[in-house]
Image (cartoon, rainbow, N blue to C red):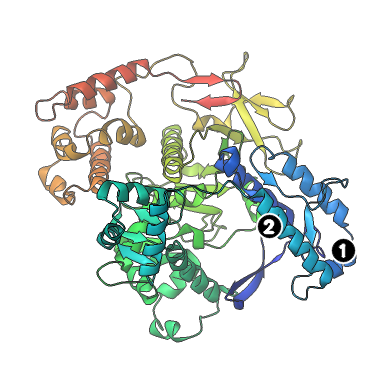
Amino acid sequence: LKISEALDHQPTIEYYIDGKPIGKSYPSPLSHKKIFEHCLEAMRSQNLPQNDRPLIVIVGTHRDDAGKCEETIDRKDEQLNALVDTTCKWVRVLYESDSHRPKRLIFRVNGKVPQDEDKKVAKRLRKKIVEKSPTPIKMPIAWFGLEVLLQTSSHDGILSLSECQMHAKKLFIEENAFSAALHHLVQHNIFLHYPEVLPQIVFCDPQVVLTKVSELVEFHHKLRGDGEEEADGDQNKDWEGEDFVARFRDWGMLSKELLGKFKKFYKEGLFTPDDLIKLLKSCRAIAVMEGGKFFMPALLHHLKEDKILEYLKQCTTLVVTFVSTCIPNGLFCCLVAHLTSLNKASCWKVCTKSIDEPRCLYRNCISFIRHGGLEIVTLIDMSSYIAIHVDKANASRKVCSEIRDCIHDGISSVCNLLGYSGVEFEDAFICPDTHCSPDPHVAVVERGEKYKYIWRCSKVTSLCGEVKDQVMWLPENAATTGVPLSMEDEPSLPLLMDKVAAKIPHKYEAVGIQLGIPPADLNVLRPSPQCLEDNLRAFSEIFDMWRRHVSRPYKWSTIIEVLNTEHVAEYRLSAELTSWITGATTVTSGTSMTT
């Protein structure tokens, strides 16, 4: 933190590698205060055990220039302390002085030309950090020996699993003990191993994976500049005249060829660009696109807050709020990758137009064309909630309900992937009354006595009204609490994928035949053997063809009949689904709206 700048000031962002600046600097879209607030909320979303909670240290640079800022250091400490107090249950804080009032959070130093006073502060800071360090990790001496042996044996930080097992035998560590040792080292992030996607690769240095991602960030930043700058060096000469440089810079689009240009750490026969793609896909860092291209949402530019606020004011928007936290760290980009990947059932296509249309492609505000539909869906990362807007021309109640369910399913899936346990989220709306606050804010939805549903402003508890324009987001049977679904209702694609496809992914062909899908169409969908994602994608296409061509009535009763045929023979699943349909209810409680 620059002491010479106010907390509301938007700092300059600069990238350095090995002490050398890369690309051009540019102003942050967020102020110092907003950045710190976002970091606190990100730590809060981790919900870690007490001993593992992160330690917050704030170092204030440019100590000699503190007098140039009208906002005093004490005033900065007051504001930062107020933010810390709201998250003190989820973080540990290191104070420069907790006897001073307000408590001093900022350690004040001159970073570039440190004087004796600054060196004393640095020495005191190191001592405090050591005192606050968590309990050391305990492990058998043989496991520690294995860690050292593997790290010294892997000059580039990568070994095959068989090589690791061979080295373990040198220490008389048998197979079962080796598996336990590897699990322990991975659990504490000393090593990285991804058995589901890269079973034969062990990263003995986590920096390998970080470096491969950093290479993309570095090159993207070099290209970024003012939107027209070209990268320097031999790399750009290889791509001269090809449009994927612009696609990478403006749209975050990657290709296998581009990843192959960064050769560091690749090891033929062990770790290749194909392996990196598998890893990034499994982490939802990238989405699979058409034509062998990949989409990395985290590389997109950030849309300024004033543009987003202007956009929200003209929309009838649903928001997804997270109970007792902000949006969990990393969730938004992973959700975008989840929705846009061709390997997922709910494949959406990103819009590459400007926000003025209004279609946009930004890190925090992104538009899609939904699979099988014409409507444009825009997701907006508002830090404390996700806003969802559908263009009014195609915003039918059925469409909005399907979109809502799809996003709910995506959030749940990504939370499980990222290890966020117990994350709760609710539906709400942007408050329709702008008189209580000029900026968009949340209005929760609840049952009212006079109206079927009312919205209630979260800022002014007495301000409420009937849900009108927003009713398109409510489930079809939301008007009457306790009314079960009917066998004659039309099923949504997310529910079909969750309740049927996910339970019997290998029976996509049998279900398709019973739904009356022509054999020629089924042959086109034939997936790779034993590929779960391909099976689910085939199921998605089958359900979509069933819905559009109406080969058999598009309702739940047809699915029940199909499951009970001899060809499919999923009698238990049929019974479970029947019980779920006849017992499903819509429930609203307090300020939440759940289905």
- The residue shown at (30%, 30%) is 499
Residue at numbered disc 2: 30
Horizontal side of 280 relative to 223 (left or right) equals: left
> Residue 7 is drawn in which quadrant?
bottom right
In the rendered image, residue 137, in percent from the top left (x then y), is placed at 51, 48
> Is the residue 10 above or below the residue 259 in the image?
above
Q: Earlier in the sequence, mark 2 or mark 1?
A: 2
How far apart in space, not on screen, are marks 2 and 1 (Cα)? 19 Å
Residue at numbered disc 1: 69
Horizontal side of 523 relative to 258 (left or right) equals: left
Q: Quadrant of the N terminus?
A: bottom right
Amino acid at pointer 1: Cys
Q: Nearer the viewer, residue 114 or 16?
A: 114
Q: Are marks 2 and 1 in contact (CB under 8 Å)?
A: no
- Decide: few, some or many residues near mark 1? Use Cα within 10 Å; few <14, some 14-19, many ≥20: few
- Decide: few, some or many residues near mark 2? Use Cα within 10 Å; few <14, some 14-19, many ≥20: some
Name the secondary structure under disc 2: loop
- The residue shown at (75%, 30%) is 460
- The residue shown at (22%, 48%) is 531
Amino acid at pointer 2: Leu
Residue 149 appears in the figure: yes
Name the secondary structure under disc 1: loop
Horizontal side of 116 relative to 395 (left or right) equals: right
In the rendered image, residue 256, in percent from the top left (x then y), is placed at 33, 69
> Residue 434 is drawn in which quadrant?
top right
In the rendered image, residue 569, in percent from the top left (x then y), is placed at 13, 26
